[in-house]
Image: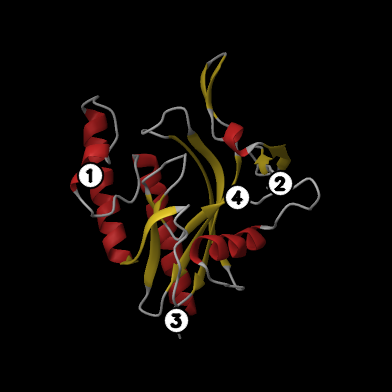
Amino acid sequence: MERYKIPLVNGSGRTIGYGDRWWAHGVRDGPDGLILGEKHVGITIACLDDDRRILVQHRRHRVFDKVWSLSGDTHPRKYDTRKVETVSEAARRCAKEDLGVVIKRWRKTVCLSYSARDPRDPRYCENELLHILAAKHGGLVHMNKKNAYELRWAKFSEILRDSQKDLKRSQMIANTHLGSTPCSHSRLKRSKKPCWATRSVIRLILITILISIRRFVDLETP
């Protein structure tokens, strides 16, 4: 399979080149401390059904493995022989690869910048300019077992409530100087209840994303 690179961006979001995806997600030593990868473009897709539920996946990946995410995650791909994918093209490919569905119309709901280290494997991190795209899809989906452990439909209120609860918990832990890892391996093994993210910074981002997607649903509903 032909290797691809992903877009690297500066602090203003301008593309400055293309880099290896694993290098962009790697934590390394720098002159002033740890460097969390390279800032790059990321994409998360959110599929919503007619009952205003959102499709979530139990992520299977080298980076942030076993985290509950939205419907799919990817990056625009740049192959040597082709132009880099647009954000919409990457979203359509992600839906087809991860969910087995063709969705042509996507709406960008929000774009935000964040970085976080993987608490399960501190060699890896995320450092993204993240684009969230949403679309309506009420049909069947087919899970790609290479990229997910499980798919399920969840209500906005369920995800938001659990995210806010775990955000408060992680802040309490941080205040006692015990670290912040609200979703541990043991907790995952004990319970099948989704743990929607792994660090307080990601929970804040998820809450922001949910609010933006909820606005999308309100706009799309007659």
> Which mark is nearer the camera, 1 or 4?
1
- In the picture of the structure, the residue carrying the numbered disc 3 is 221
Q: Is residue 163 left or right of residue 123?
A: left
| Res. 221 image quadrant | bottom left
Q: Name which residue lies at 66% across and 62% down.
A: 89
> Which mark is nearer the camera, 2 or 4?
2
Amino acid tagged 1: Lys
| Res. 158 image quadrant | bottom left
Above or below residue 151? Residue 60 is above
Give SS at disc 2. Answer: loop
| Res. 3 image quadrant | top right
| First along the sequence among labels 2 and 3 | 2
Q: CA distance from mark 1 to mark 4?
A: 30 Å
**Residue nearer the viewer, 200 or 36:** 36
- In the picture of the structure, the residue carrying the numbered disc 1 is 189
Question: At which x and y percent is residue 66?
Answer: 36, 46
**Residue nearer the viewer, 145 or 134:** 145
Let me know if residue 138 appears in the view.
Answer: yes
> Which mark is nearer the camera, 2 or 3?
2
Q: CA distance from mark 1 to mark 2?
A: 36 Å
Question: At which x and y percent is residue 32?
Answer: 54, 15
- In the picture of the structure, the residue carrying the numbered disc 2 is 2
Question: At which x and y percent is residue 176?
Answer: 20, 27
**Residue nearer the viewer, 169 or 68:** 68
> Tag 3: Cα neighbours inside 10 Å, few (<14), some, or many (≥20)?
few
Outermost bottom residue: 222
- In the picture of the structure, the residue carrying the numbered disc 4 is 75
Q: How is the image coloured?
A: secondary structure
Give SS at disc 4. Answer: loop
Q: Are marks 1 and 2 in contact (CB under 8 Å)?
A: no
Q: Name which residue lies at 40% across and 80% down.
A: 50
| First along the sequence among labels 1 and 2 | 2
